């Protein structure tokens, strides 16, 4: 990874955009520690856990202690609380240990070590960033803004996770990356506070509507825990539980609730060491393209929301992340017709009481969707259709709309011949965003000769930028392998747009 910048060396690709010679490359040293069960990664699954534990337990205590010391010496500096992780992994396979054995602490830890492995989260690629103001603005000089950058990290097996780093923008067109070193940590899954309206939207999505589901919904408070949900199920009338569809309905309702969860990190773990890792079957093959945006909550406090794509290897689904501090995250499944494809981006505030999002529910047209009173994202109103040579395959957004005095600024992307991506821009009416005011008649940013080479060639793509000190700052992925940074004078960008009749 390089992190040097002399603004005087910035090179312009058009009269508008300044590409900054600051890039982030995938770093194979950034690893997390994961559960490893021998045999389960084979094409023909044959669990070998019991045989492995038998072999470990044949070692004497001196050998166990020596092996554990070797592992701790070799790996301790690469992870937070390595011994704690080993003990957790031991607990996950403890049922394989004969119940009459009283194991020493070293033996339990060593078993946990054998059931652990490192995973390099960005060994394959690093791409598709989004940028929001950082919750910590301390220690800055005049004209500077610290930003939090989310990153799509792609590792072995093309499994994506969400990582973070921070940078400082300004004054002017200056930018610098902050420290990105140190051990990584996967967030700890904690008890979620579920939303009743989200449960109702899930029932509607799966077309579950019978007396059992209706009684359950009516008995739930506005927000509830998993334990409270199970308590409601446990007190349902026996007559409803005896119906022929009960088993299927209970399974579907539990599936809806299990899709939502919460993750938290210790306060002492800095942002750049936090990793959001797939935590449900629906996202087992990846959490893709998080689009973060800073929002104002109904109580007036600032917080963050992000949409991302959950992928299980065959199916995709939209998810919503909510957090006040980028430390505790709540994950909720998005529901409705507009949430069934990739690329949803939320508006940072309600518009005339409407909760809105950009989406591409048909796979090729950028549209505007509204969330209804049942927490479902409705069919989109088309905003931008493929119509120019560089975007005839499909168009979409490059992150959430940015509010300006002139209107909602939307960075777009288009796909042209040879699946070559380019980034464009358009302007929506502040009060009626379904009305397009203006757009840029040409691409704003496209792959140069260096950026076109990579994991997925000929692609530039962003999940969101922001305005600071009169400039729009755009982090972007280049060919799905590295991250670059560009900035644009807002006045010049708006002046270059053509009014739409």
Image (tube, rainbow, N blue to C red):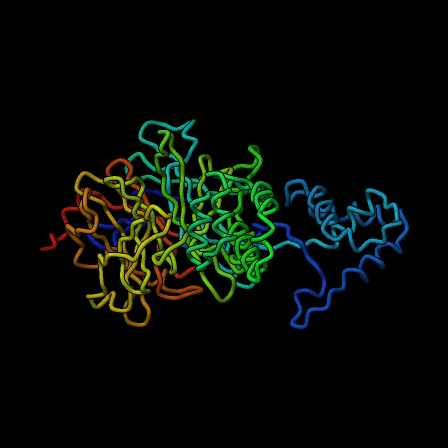
Residue 304 seen anywhere in this rendered image of the structure:
yes
Query: Where is residue 297 drawn, in percent x and y?
Result: 37, 34
- In the picture shown, does residue 390 fall above or below 80? below
Query: Where is residue 213 drawn, in percent x and y?
Result: 50, 52
- Nearest the viewer among 193 and 271 is 193
Tell me where residue 174 sits by quadrant.
top left
- In the picture shown, does residue 43 fall above or below 252? below
Residue drawn at point x = 42 percent, y = 64 percent: 454
Residue drawn at point x = 51 percent, y = 62 percent: 312
Residue 183 seen anywhere in this rendered image of the structure:
no
Residue drawn at point x = 64 percent, y = 54 percent: 118
- Nearest the viewer among 15 and 273 is 273
Q: Residue most toward the left? A: 501
- Nearest the viewer among 54 and 193 is 193
Residue drawn at point x = 39 percent, y = 38 percent: 147
Query: Where is residue 248 drawn, in percent x and y?
Result: 56, 61
Q: In this view, does 101 lie to the left or right of 250?
A: right
Query: Where is residue 372 drawn, in percent x and y?
Result: 32, 48
Considering the image in quadrants, where does the C terminus appear? Answer: bottom left
Q: Is residue 164 left or right of residue 144?
A: right
- Nearest the viewer among 43 and 314 is 314
- In the picture shown, does residue 388 fall above or below 252? below
């Amino acid at each position: 990874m390089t992190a040097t910048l002399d603004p005087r060396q910035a090179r312009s690709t058009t009269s508008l955009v300044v590409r900054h010679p600051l890039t982030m490359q995938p770093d194979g040293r950034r690893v997390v520690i994961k559960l490893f069960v021998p045999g389960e990664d084979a094409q023909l699954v044959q669990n070998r856990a019991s045989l492995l534990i038998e072999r470990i337990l044949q070692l004497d205590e001196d050998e166990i202690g020596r092996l554990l010391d070797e592992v701790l010496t070799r790996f301790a500096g690469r992870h937070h609380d390595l011994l704690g992780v080993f003990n957790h992994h031991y607990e996950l396979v403890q049922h394989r240990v004969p119940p009459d054995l009283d194991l020493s602490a070293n033996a339990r830890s060593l078993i946990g070590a054998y059931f652990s492995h490192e995973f390099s989260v960005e060994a394959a690629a690093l791409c598709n960033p989004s940028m929001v103001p950082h919750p910590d603005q301390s220690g800055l000089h005049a004209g500077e803004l610290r930003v939090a950058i989310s990153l799509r990290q792609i590792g072995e097996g093309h499994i994506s996770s969400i990582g973070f780093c921070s940078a400082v923008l300004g004054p002017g067109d200056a930018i610098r990356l902050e420290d990105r070193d140190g051990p990584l940590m996967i967030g700890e899954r904690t008890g979620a506070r579920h939303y009743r309206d989200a449960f109702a939207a899930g029932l509607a999505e799966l077309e579950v509507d019978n007396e059992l589901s209706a009684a359950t919904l009516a008995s739930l408070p506005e927000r509830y825990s998993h334990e409270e949900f199970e308590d409601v199920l446990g007190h349902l009338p026996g007559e409803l539980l005896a119906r022929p569809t009960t088993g299927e309905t209970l399974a579907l309702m539990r599936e809806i609730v299990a899709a939502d969860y919460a993750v938290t990190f210790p306060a002492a773990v800095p942002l750049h060491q936090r990793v959001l890792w797939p935590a449900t079957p629906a996202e087992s093959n990846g959490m893709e393209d998080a689009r973060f945006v800073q929002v104002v909550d109904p109580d007036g406090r600032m917080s963050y929301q992000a949409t991302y794509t959950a992928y299980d290897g065959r199916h995709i689904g939209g998810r919503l992340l909510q957090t006040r501090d980028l430390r505790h995250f709540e994950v909720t499944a998005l529901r409705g017709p507009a949430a069934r494809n990739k690329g949803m981006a939320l508006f940072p505030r309600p518009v005339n009481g409407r909760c809105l999002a950009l989406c591409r529910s048909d796979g090729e047209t950028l549209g505007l969707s509204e969330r209804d009173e049942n927490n479902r994202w409705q069919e989109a109103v088309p905003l931008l259709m493929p119509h120019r040579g560089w975007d005839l395959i499909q168009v979409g957004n490059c992150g959430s709309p940015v509010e300006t005095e002139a209107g909602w600024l939307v960075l777009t992307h288009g796909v042209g011949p040879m699946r070559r991506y380019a980034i464009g821009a358009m302007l929506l009416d502040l009060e009626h965003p379904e009305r397009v005011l203006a757009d840029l008649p040409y691409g704003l940013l496209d792959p140069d000769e260096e950026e076109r080479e990579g994991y997925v060639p000929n692609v530039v793509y962003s999940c969101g930028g922001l305005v600071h000190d009169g400039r729009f700052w755009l982090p972007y992925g280049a060919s799905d392998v590295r991250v670059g940074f560009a900035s644009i004078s807002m006045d010049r960008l708006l002046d270059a747009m053509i009014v739409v009749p």
